[in-house]
Amino acid sequence: MIAPRWRKVLRDIAAHPGRSFLAGLALSTGVFQVGALIHQYAILEPLLATMYSRTNPASAILFVDDAGDDLVEAVRQVPGVARAEARPIIMARVRVRTGDGGGDPDGEWLPAVLYVVRDFDDLRIDTFKPNGGAWPPGGDEVLLERSALSLTGVGTGDRLTARNPAGDEIALRVAGSVHAEGLAPAWMDHVVPGFVPWNSAARTGLGGESAQIRIIADHPLDEGYIREVAAKVRTMIEGRGHTVTRVGIETPGKHPHADQMSAFMYLLGAFGILSLVLSAVLVAGMVHALLAEQVRQVGIMKAIGGSTRQIAGLYVGQIALLAVAALALGLPAGLAVGRAYARFSAGILNVDITDTPFPARAFAAVVAIGLLLPLLVALVPIHRASRITVHQALNDDLGPRPFGSRRLERWLARRTWLPRPFLLSLRTTCLRRGRLALTVGTLAIGGAVFMSALNVSGAWTRAVDSDFRARHYDLQVVLSRPYPIATLVEIVTAVPGVAHAEYWPGASPALVGAGGVAGGNVALLGLEPDSTLLDLPLVAGRWLRADDPRGVVINQTVVACNPDLHAGGIVELRLDGRSVTFPIAGVVKELNPVPVIYAPARAVLEATGQAGDTARTLRIVTGAHDDAAQRAAAAALEAAFLARGIEVGGMTRMLDARKAILDHLVIVMAVLTMASVIVVFVGAIALASTLTLSVVQRTREFGILGAIGAAPWTIARHVWLESLLISVAGWIVSLLLAAPVSGLLESVTGGIFFKAPLDFFVSVGAAAIWLILSVALASLCSIHPARRAARLTVREALAYA
Amino acid sequence: MIMLRNVTRTYQTPAGGFAALKGLDLDVPAGEFAAVVGRSGSGKSTLLNLMAGIDRPSSGSVVVGGRAIHDLGNDRLAAWRGRTVGIVFQFFQLLPTLTAAENVMLPMDFCGAVPTRDRRRRAIDLLARVEVADQADKLPATLSGGQQQRVAIARALANDPPVILADEPTGNLDSATSAAIFRLFGDLSRDGKTVVVVTHEREAVSGVVRTVTLADGCVVS
């Protein structure tokens, strides 16, 4: 038999279904969000830590003139080499399918990388696995990375046309798809990865392959060791009479999208903490509200012999019951959503979640948080409530203080010119400051996150727009080798839709860091100092000048690679085995993760030894700058170059490049959106519960209003006004919070992606949207309490004790 | 049974200190049925609250059943109250989510004076004594005012306390029910309970052994 006091606990819950539902919903929302975040973190964290290494990524890639079996076998014998494999690549372009038709002759050409695989059944380095269709592919077939299927619009059995820079085309049958975890999704980088066999027709039909030997060192995470081993391999290969043009060494163990992952995990962690704080605030508010209603009953129980501990025990039990119910409701949903969201996030990173064992640790953590957090935050209000004396409880000594005892209240009391109904709501709202602060705080945090999501999105879009506005060209063309500028001018000027073109020399030297050690490659671009095509914002120093033939400008990514570099300093490059130095005239900020050095064209030509009348890269300005104009000009240029035998290595439309950058931000925006939706939901619950409680506590007041002639709708309007005032107060505080939160997020995500913080941006539109949402939320949340207040009869209200 | 000596109770209000009781002395012998009467604001309820240990005197001493309760801490006071005093309020103050029987069992639950298995039976017996046993399993909201007050009296008797204190127990009842309630208190007094009833209804206090009249915080008769 259950003791009467515990029956009281159960019936108190059942007696106020609306309030109990709100309390349970608030708690379960907290459990849900914490559960979802912890679970997805628990799934993704180990996955992200291992996903790259389990594809056996190459420690180093040697670009050689031959990748025959004998040479690869010799590489395997070099001390320190654990594995070696030939994996030549063919840089080509493929025609995507934009309609339902077969060949789709109007389809756009996208850059593609065809990896030539020695033995599909003996993959040792940069492994991938079958995803569908045939394995291995035949000589005239290709396996596409699965993320390329939607980008190209082809499926298994379709024909995919590939073209080399010389314009030679070959149709490959799509044999199926593979999943290559080590590669970024095709839709994100806008590059089509494909895999062809050693005897592929593409090797002869397209040619121009870059022979590569990939190695894994014995200590694959030690970059210094990898460099030593790569140097030994290079020496061995050159000793056998071959040429090694370049050795590529990426940061060991770093996935191509590791930066996005870092941002993602950072946001997950930040919002996990925020969720906990919000849950705690909400639970504290709920407990406070619950106990405020129970004051008289506490007095009665004490009057009939209940001790402080016994009464505190009752309310601890009540909170525990609600917490258990909230766990039962929120935990399964939170875990399921966490798993689904982890799958979604992994999909963005081109990773599959295949193994999702029962999340014991996440489960235990959420249960502990879901049970302990409500009890912990409830302890103080329960302690306070259960310690009140019978006299205080039964004589309403704990009721609201007399209005006017605080400065704000006295100030409000003097504002007699305000409409009386509004005045009454305003004064009532301010009377219970603790609860008001909790509700306003919850709404403000929700609003701040919501606005920050929009602000960060706006900051990104502004940064991208600003960056692309600084590039006054529409197409970027890379040729497979330098061509006479005169020929190029002749071709380009004849193409309809082209308004202007510049011909920039370029190279990819290695940046020499501290101690004279060559590090990663940088892009060295030559342009005339008076070129109007680039107008990048300067962080320090000045732009290129005609009277300074060797002064260069570096972007902030170069500075991130070598923080010692600065305007007025010297940058050293290793180019074809030679060391070249340039004085740094300035530093520019651009949305580019690639380190770029802008130099006078003549300086680049001198450093590279290229002829001054040839160029390999072009910047094209079209007459119109919309998508259709860029596409038309690109197609016309493509055809014109093909007709004159000019080999095009790649052609990038700037609108397409802009979209690719924004696509990289999908995951960040997804996390922000999810967090803000949950937080706004929590804020709505807090507001609804505050109003419900306010109606209960103002019952007598409503009775008096009714007795002196207030119509039910007048009373309902009071409740709505109170709700509106709280929401607007929340909106004002959220404006103050949104600025630093947005600034922090903009700084961190900008730093992760582009090595520079985004410019601080807060959107007036975001504030306006949140204000509109706040008013809508206030109205929505006040419907039930207002109806309840309006339905009270005067007799009931006045008799309320 | 109840002894108050030089008891003063002063409340602080925005307008300054207000003395509800001023140096009051009062003795209520065991088994006496006393009524405390007086106008509104005379200090009746304050006096009752001090006897019940619900309030503390600003100065002076309150001794009930030989125990100086003005020195007890809140928890000891609650335990003492549960065993020594049964309180009946003007607005009944039944817990709305518990049935009549459960309301009566609750003090037993808190004090543990009655074995768990005997509590229900004792609650029904007490309800029978106040003639509402047939309402035992009903919630307070379904009972009339008189029935609720009878349940409240049964609850006051739950732990068989020697003292019953009632604060305007008939203030919300019609005259016939009020008379019945006073008869009930008379019966309790005859059974040996010390009963102190605060009321402003002079005509309803017939049957009491002694009437204490308060005015402006002092005993005037």
Image (cartoon, helix red, strand yellow):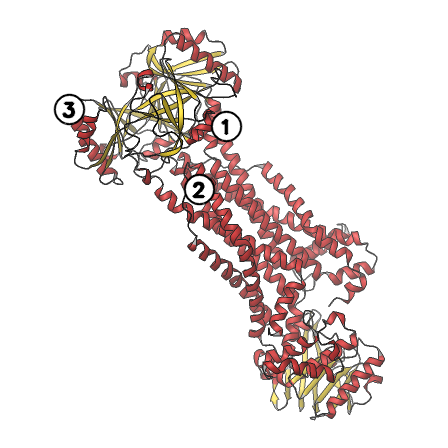
Q: Quadrant of the C terminus of chain B?
A: bottom right
The residue wearing badge 1 is A465
Return the x and y of residue A213 as percentages of the image width and height.
25, 28
The Cα atoms of the two marked residues, 3 and 2, are separated by 47 Å
Q: Tell me: residue B75, above or below residue A111.
A: below
Tell me what residue is drawn at x 45 percent, y 57 percent.
A364
Q: Nearer the viewer, residue A281 or B104?
A: B104
Q: Nearer the viewer, residue A80 or A709?
A: A80
Please tell me whether mark 2 or mark 1 is closer to you in this view: 2
Return the x and y of residue A782 as percentages of the image width and height.
69, 51
| Chain letter of the residue beneath label 1 in the structure image | A
Which one is earlier in the sequence, the residue at label 1 or at label 3?
3
Mark 1–mark 3 CB contact (< 8 Å): no
Which one is earlier in the sequence, the residue at label 3 or at label 2?
3
Return the x and y of residue A496 as percentages of the image width and height.
49, 9
Tell me what residue is drawn at x 55 percent, y 74 percent.
A309
Tell me what residue is drawn at x 51 percent, y 35 percent.
A459
Q: Quadrant of the N terminus of chain B?
A: bottom right
Q: In the visual, does A287 lie left or right of A196? A: right
**In the rendered structure, which amino acid carries the disc numbered 1?**
Asp
Q: Which mark is residue A240?
A: 3
